[in-house]
Amino acid sequence: QVQLVESGGGSVQSGGSLRLSCAASGYSDSTYSMGWFRQAPGKEREGVAGIDSDGRTRYADSVKGRFTISLDNTKRVYLQMNSLKPEDTALYYCAADQRRMTGLQQLGLRPRYWGQGTQVTVSS
């Protein structure tokens, strides 16, 4: 069974940085793609960044130039978040799927596997 465990959330002032990490387990092949989603109170969950198994990436317009997604060979995905803004405040979820995450996010589809989420709070 695929399991995803996020870490690295917290509170930061506007302009600050945080790095989220997600460790995946329960699968052995390298074809899974991974991504980050977020959900703020009263808003729909949105795809923030995705990375496919071949390294293709996709970012939401609101985070381009500020966030960077990366994947290492230990099935851990990272989200480096710089120049954080109060509107980045949300519960951030890690997700995984054997389909292309970039495509799923672009089409607004939900990946199959989800983590429990980690809170990011940015104060002004």
Image: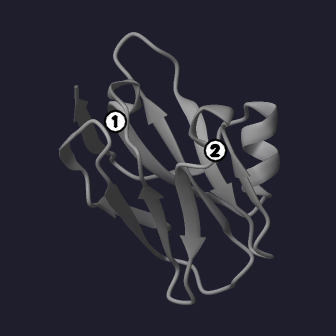
In this figure, what is the number of numbered marks? 2
Q: At which x and y percent is residue 63?
A: 57, 40
Q: Which residue is mark 2?
A: 64
Q: At which x and y percent is residue 12?
A: 20, 43
The tag earlier along the polypeptide, 2 or 1, is: 2
Q: Nearer the viewer, residue 110 or 118?
A: 118
Marks 2/1: CA–CA distance: 19 Å
Q: At which x and y percent is residue 76?
A: 47, 76
Q: Badge 1, how many Cα within 10 Å: few under 14, some, many 20+?
A: some
Q: Is residue 4 left or right of residue 70?
A: left
User: Farthest top residue?
Assistant: 42
Q: Quadrant of residue 54?
A: bottom right
Instruction: State the quadrant of the C terminus.
Output: top left
Q: At which x and y percent is residue 61?
A: 68, 34
For image coordinates 28% across by 41% down, the residue present is 120
Q: Is residue 8 left or right of residue 29?
A: left
Q: Is residue 121 left or right of residue 71?
A: left
For image coordinates 38% across by 23% down, the residue present is 40
For image coordinates 44% across by 61% down, the residue present is 80
Q: Badge 2, how many Cα within 10 Å: few under 14, some, many 20+?
A: few
Q: Which mark is residue 75?
A: none
The kind of residue on which mark 1 rests is Leu
Q: Is residue 99 above or below residue 108?
A: below
Q: Nearer the viewer, residue 97 or 13?
A: 13
Q: Which residue is mark 1?
A: 91
The kind of residue on which mark 2 rests is Lys
